[in-house]
Amino acid sequence: MAEKKDKKEKEKTEKKESKGPIHMKGYSMAFDPEKTARALGRDLPISRKKSMELCRKLRGMKLQDAKDYLEEVMEMKRPVPFRRYTSGAGHKRGIGPGKYPVKAAKYILEVIESAEANADYMGLDVDELVIKSIAAHPGRVYRGFMPRAHGRSTPWDKKTTNIEVILESSEV
């Protein structure tokens, strides 16, 4: 019996000592904390659908390219291609259905800049960072109501979005 307990305790300590990828609460994928920097934006007042389309476009981009792209989206110079939520999206030359989600781009840029600052603090080379993971998830719903005629009311909820960003050093 004692041998089994010792063996289990030894396995637990070996798992703790290994420096492989870890999975933290709040992030949708495992990452290596020594090569990556991360940031979360919680309960942002932006559209989840537009955020998902924007995140799809940014995933895999170099950090500086992504920041430049978001600046151009906010200036309405480059549209974001919409692949899933195409309702009301007009045709844009070269990409098909697309929109200019200015508000979503502004908040996502803030989260990316926060992850960049975290990477700089950790000592990673900021010029070599790539967006490994960026995702939008539904956030908290703030319940509200709109008064209507004859003493009735209609739900008037404010939906929020959570954004997660993981930057990884592309040095090999």
Image (cartoon, rainbow, N blue to C red):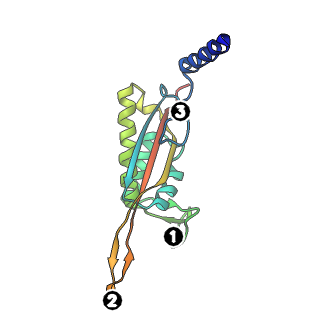
* Disc assigned to residue 31: 3
Q: Report the side of 78 relative to 14 (left or right).
A: left
Disc 3 residue type?
Answer: Phe
Q: Residue at x 50, y 33 (%)?
A: 168
Residue 114 image-quadrant placement: top left
Q: Distance between the residues labelled 3 and 1?
A: 35 Å
Q: Distance between the residues labelled 1 and 2?
A: 38 Å
Q: Can residue 71 be seen in this view?
A: no
The C terminus: image quadrant: top right
* Disc assigned to residue 68: none
Is the Cβ of the residue at disc 3 closer than 8 Å to that at disc 1? Answer: no
Secondary structure beneath dot 1 equals: loop
Disc 2 residue type?
Answer: His
Disc 1 residue type?
Answer: Ala
Q: Which residue is drawn at 41% across and 43% down?
A: 40
| Residue 78 in picture, x, y percent from top left | 45, 58
Secondary structure beneath dot 2 equals: helix
Q: Mark 1 points at which residue?
A: 89
The N terminus: image quadrant: top right
Q: Residues within 10 Å of mark 3 (few under 14, many from 20)?
A: many
Q: Mark 2 points at which residue?
A: 150
| Residue 101 in picture, x, y percent from top left | 42, 61
| Residue 69 in picture, x, y percent from top left | 43, 51
Residue nearest the viewer, comparing 57 with 64: 57
